[in-house]
Image (tube, rainbow, N blue to C red):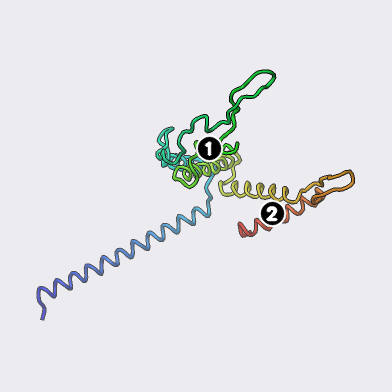
Amino acid sequence: MSTPQNNKAKFQEMLDFLESRKLKKETETLKTKRSYSEEIKKAKPESGPEAVDRILKEIKTARGSVMSGDKPLYPGDYPEPMPDEQRYKTGRFSRGGIDESKTPIPFKSATGLYEKEAREGTPGTTSYIGGQRVKELEGELSTAQSAKESGESFPKQGMDEAVQAKYREYMELFDQPRVQDTQHNFSGRYVPKEKSRHLAELATREWFKKTYGQ
């Protein structure tokens, strides 16, 4: 026997079914659109001008996440200002008969580490990580600009630059000149120039296959 409560339950069940089918259809539509968009990107790689515009926006966002104008958003990520007497070695010495009271020596064993951290932030902090990301994007921007000027796609230009850099790396590895220790003895590995190039080319091709699967 039908009752108002049963009718209401059946009606709600029907609504839930229709809503579920509608949601499923919308989900499938979104998946189709996403797949289509991904296929379009594969078929038409990002151009140089497109990459330049995109990366400029990303740099602005990345820099804005750690800086406000020229001021850091996280001042505590940088070392405290250091007095000159701690940053320099002091003392008197004579140079050409003229006494000088201070010899500039960069802090931390003349490595310039304090100055570096004062510019970039202490390693591991938000400011430092954000700054490193900006540097990475600036490198990508340079590649995008080269792609724009050459007419190559951004991925192709990036791949070409990576291959050239890897080849130079292998050339430095294989191109080892002989070092003369004494009048008659040589040390170090000696590889003829032609063989160095050949080995670097072989190693670069192997790296290319592993990296790009081609």
Depth order, front residue of 60/151: 60
Residue sitting at x 59%, y 45% = 152
Q: Marks 2/1: CA distance?
A: 38 Å
What residue would you read off at disc 2?
Answer: 204
The single residue placed furthest to the bottom in the displayed view is 1
Indicate the amino acid at tag 1: Tyr
Dot placed on the residue nearer the N-terminal end, 2 or 1: 1
Q: Nearer the viewer, residue 41 or 195?
A: 195
User: Dot 2 surroundings within 10 Å: few (below 14), some, or many (20 or more)?
Assistant: many
Q: Is residue 126 left or right of residue 142?
A: left
Q: Is residue 96 above or below residue 170?
A: above
Q: Residue 11: give x, y in percent of width and height.
A: 17, 70
Residue furthest out toward the front: 92
Give the left or right position of residue 41, taking residue 188 as reference: left
Residues marked 2 and 1 touching at CB (< 8 Å):
no
Q: Residue furthest top?
A: 97
Q: Residue at x 76, y 50 (%)?
A: 197
Eye-nearest disc, 2 or 1: 1
Quadrant where the C terminus sits is bottom right
Tag 1 secondary structure: helix
* Residue 147 image-quadrant placement: top right
